[in-house]
Amino acid sequence: MKKTGSRIAHETGVTTLIMGAALLACTTSASAATLPVSSYDMINGAASTPGLSLRDDTYAGGTGNPGENYSTLAGGKGDLTDGLIATSNWNITPAEFVGWSQIYVRNPEITFHFAQVMDIADVSIHMNWGYSASSVDFSVDRTTWINRVINLPDPPTGANFQAGFAGLGLTGDTLVIRLNDRSPFYWNSSLLSADWILISEVSIEGSLAPIPEPTVTSLLLAGIGVVCFAARRRVRPGILPG
């Protein structure tokens, strides 16, 4: 019997559903790229001296006062994800930095939010050489933490440097970064106080997390069910003998 146009279209749609489910089942994470941050939360930075702001003054879209020292900021974005990396020292271009004094904020934390669950591979934090963290803790649930030590470039290659943290292997829709304070240290016979932490940009690399296996299995079973239903509809009952 010839197939009608509607039957062909129906069976084509079923085939497409099955193929799509099969492709999803075989999907692996895409190559790593910079993850889009939907917002981040933190305690604001502060002015080191009157007229020299190390606050996140461009923070917008959330709550808190970006113009107030150590205000609680939530639900917005600002300096740390604007793509601008400081190339000069903090006292020359303070607007490119966010800074926390150890006297008021010990081990500052930043919570980054993503619109979807992500596989988080690498993180880069651009810091000031003289006022960097000693190490960084990473977590997606505030229960399990990964600690990475920061080794300062010696001698420094400039006022600032990029601290890279590869192979984190975390999965979640949030990432908490804790910047651990550094003790005063000697360099070139001078004691550097390191009583602040100054950063200018945070970049997070990774990919969209694959669909969990139970979801893929459900899609496959749903596709098989549609095929069986379509097959039953095509069976015509015979004429019973009189």
Image (spheres, rainbow, N blue to C red):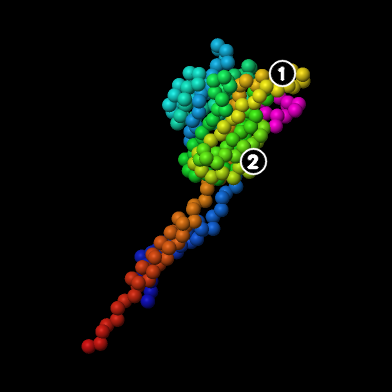
Figure check: 194 above or below 178: above
- Across and down, in percent, residue 61 comes to 44, 28
Characterize the magenta stretch by its predominant secondary structure: loop
Neighbour tally class for label 2: few under 14, some 14-19, many 20 plus, Cα within 10 Å: few
Q: Amino acid at mark 1?
A: Leu
Neighbour tally class for label 1: few under 14, some 14-19, many 20 plus, Cα within 10 Å: few
* Residue depicted at 38% across the width and 64% down the height: 226
Residue 96, visible in the rendered structure: no
Q: Is residue 36 left or right of residue 222?
A: right
How far apart, in angstroms, are the residues tagged by discs 2 and 1? 31 Å
73 and 29: which is toward the camera? 73
Secondary structure state at the residue bearing disc 1: strand
Q: Amino acid at mark 2?
A: Ala
Q: Is residue 53 magenta?
A: no
Q: Which residue is mark 1?
A: 191
Figure check: 147 above or below 47: below
Q: Which residue is mark 2?
A: 166
- Across and down, in percent, residue 92 comes to 63, 17
| Farthest residue, direction top | 50
* Residue depicted at 67% across the width and 32% down the height: 150
233 and 184: which is toward the camera? 184
| Farthest residue, direction bottom | 242
Residue 153, visible in the rendered structure: yes
Secondary structure state at the residue bearing disc 2: loop
Please identify the quarter of the rendering in which residue 9 is found: bottom left
* Residue depicted at 59% across the width and 30% down the height: 179
Task: Provide the residue span drawn in magenta.
Answer: 151-161
Q: Is residue 158 magenta?
A: yes
Q: Which mark is residue 76?
A: none
Q: Is residue 142 left or right of residue 188?
A: left
* Residue depicted at 63% across the width and 43% down the height: 167
